[in-house]
């Protein structure tokens, strides 16, 4: 049995007394009544203690924490409410009481890949003023008792279908990274069943639709090691300290260690810089570091069956583009998609889902009319920049919003049915390059 989770929990337990002492020392060297807090020596001790405490902490699930936004010149309070629930997911709606104007429904499907849905805080915030936003709030598998049953790729697709049916036929869906595969599969199954709740559009962002295109280090690792290696080295059971005791999971801390190892030098430099900011008294820069890593280091576990099935079907077998992906025993036929519009978004420097992997969805969905398609390649951004940051806010999000508006106009019979313009030098018919 893989005991990694037990050793992980034990390490944090053993570090707890030292962390308590470190916190007390940091407090003593940072309070205004201590003259040493105004010296370089005092700030150095305080900074070292803070970095130690943060390095030995288990980070709690963050909050979205939206207070209020401005819509049409009015200040409107944001209220989070769970409107649909299942053992492994809640559907959160960001309600805006007092807003009377009807806006497009947008379901954002967050990745189930180790981080919480709050990683998409910036994504959600960008659409709050213009769309009726919902997001999938996936539950940490270590908090779900064994009595709740399994959760695999079939269940993920079932959840997406159930949420789209809950929202109704006028919804739009956006899949960020990992959920691109289950979302397009869910839409294909709904279209094959002539489901009236099929979404008006789906936007796939940096997703591994066809990992044969521009394979990245992540893709090559899965191909080289095979599913047996992942089962042997990545799967462990939840310890007795958690509600999901004895559930087999892929722990979030393993996923996080893999992500950090890919850019270890950058993380080391960031922590060194924070230490220097604290010593110099640069509170603003230190607070930006805290905000980022409070989010980045908060991780959740995935069920073993979902993780292994995803690795095998998406990265090893590449079942979706080869036409072999099954859902509840039925083949997922992407050619069944004909009414749901499709937009794909990629980042030029994406080192997780290479350029062309998401674009492949257009090739695999031949029955979608040309006027209901769009593709955008954002230059100068990596994986994270596809859904967050200045380029997302200023370049990517406006194009997604315009695509949704265009689809709504076409479906409502108000717009001229024609594809979006393509700039010179772009890929034929689909790609817009900034």
Image (cartoon, helix red, strand yellow):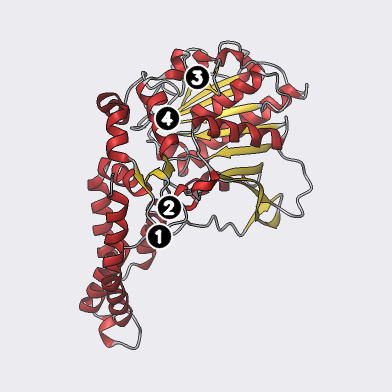
CA separation in Å, label 4 and label 3: 20 Å
Label 4 vs label 2, nearer the camera:
2
Q: In this figure, what is the number of numbered marks?
A: 4
Q: Which mark is residue 361?
A: 3
CA separation in Å, label 3 and label 2: 39 Å
Q: Nearer the viewer, residue 69 or 82?
A: 82
Which residue corresponds to mark 2? Answer: 245
Q: Which residue is depicted at the point 59% across and 32% down?
A: 158
Q: Position of residue 310 (x, y in %)?
A: 42, 30
Q: Which residue is depicted at the point 50% across and 13% down?
A: 363
Which residue corresponds to mark 1? Answer: 241
Q: Which mark is residue 309?
A: 4
Looking at the rendering, which quadrant does residue 411 occupy?
top right
Label 4 vs label 3, nearer the camera:
4
CA separation in Å, label 1 and label 3: 43 Å
Q: Provide the secondary structure element on which disc 3 rests.
A: helix
Q: Are marks 2 and 1 in contact (CB under 8 Å)?
A: yes
Earlier in the chain: of badge 4 and badge 1, it is: 1
Earlier in the chain: of badge 1 and badge 3, it is: 1
Q: Position of residue 17 (x, y in %)?
A: 28, 73
Q: Provide the secondary structure element on which disc 1 rests.
A: loop
Q: Provide the secondary structure element on which disc 2 rests.
A: loop
Looking at the rendering, which quadrant does residue 249 occupy?
top left
Q: Which residue is depicted at the point 43% across and 16% down?
A: 425
Looking at the rendering, which quadrant does residue 397 occupy?
top right
Q: Residues within 10 Å of mark 1 (few under 14, many from 20)?
A: few
């Amino acid at each position: 049995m893989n005991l990694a989770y037990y050793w992980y929990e034990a390490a944090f337990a053993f570090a707890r007394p030292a962390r308590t002492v470190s916190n007390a020392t940091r407090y003593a060297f940072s309070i205004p009544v201590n003259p040493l807090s105004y010296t370089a020596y005092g700030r150095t001790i305080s900074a070292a203690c803070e970095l130690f405490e943060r390095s030995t902490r288990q980070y709690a699930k963050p909050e979205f924490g939206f207070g209020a936004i401005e819509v049409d010149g009015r200040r409107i309070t944001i209220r989070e409410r769970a409107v649909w629930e299942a053992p492994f997911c809640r559907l959160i709606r960001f309600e805006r009481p007092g807003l009377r104007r009807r806006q497009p429904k947008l379901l954002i499907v967050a990745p189930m890949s180790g981080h919480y849905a709050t990683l998409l805080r910036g994504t959600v915030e960008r659409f709050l003023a213009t769309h009726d936003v919902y997001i999938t709030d996936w539950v940490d598998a270590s908090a779900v008792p064994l009595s709740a049953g399994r959760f695999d790729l079939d269940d993920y697709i079932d959840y997406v279908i159930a949420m789209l049916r809950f929202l109704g036929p006028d919804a739009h869906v956006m899949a960020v990274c990992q959920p691109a595969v289950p979302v397009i599969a869910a839409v294909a199954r709904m279209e094959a069943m002539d489901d009236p709740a099929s979404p008006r559009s789906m936007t796939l962002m940096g997703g591994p639709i066809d990992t044969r295109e521009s394979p990245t280090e992540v893709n090559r690792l899965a191909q080289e090691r095979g599913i047996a290696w992942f089962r042997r080295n990545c799967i462990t059971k939840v310890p007795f300290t958690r509600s999901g005791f004895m559930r087999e999971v892929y722990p979030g801390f393993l996923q996080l260690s893999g992500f950090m190892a890919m850019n270890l030098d950058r993380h080391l430099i960031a922590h060194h810089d924070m230490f220097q900011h604290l010593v110099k008294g640069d509170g603003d820069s230190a607070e930006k570091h805290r905000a980022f890593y409070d989010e980045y280091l908060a991780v959740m576990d995935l069920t073993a069956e979902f993780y292994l099935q995803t690795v095998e079907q998406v990265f090893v077998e590449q079942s979706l583009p080869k036409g072999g992906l099954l859902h509840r025993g039925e083949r997922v036929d992407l050619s069944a998609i004909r009414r749901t519009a499709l937009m794909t978004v990629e980042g030029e420097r994406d080192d997780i889902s290479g350029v062309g992997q998401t674009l492949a969805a257009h090739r695999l969905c031949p029955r979608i009319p040309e006027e209901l398609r769009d593709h955008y390649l954002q230059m100068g951004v990596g994986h994270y920049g596809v859904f967050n940051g200045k380029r997302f806010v200023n370049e990517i999000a406006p194009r997604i919003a315009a695509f949704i508006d265009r689809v709504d106009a076409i479906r409502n019979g108000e717009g001229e049915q024609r594809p979006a313009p393509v700039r010179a030098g772009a890929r034929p018919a689909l790609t817009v390059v900034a």
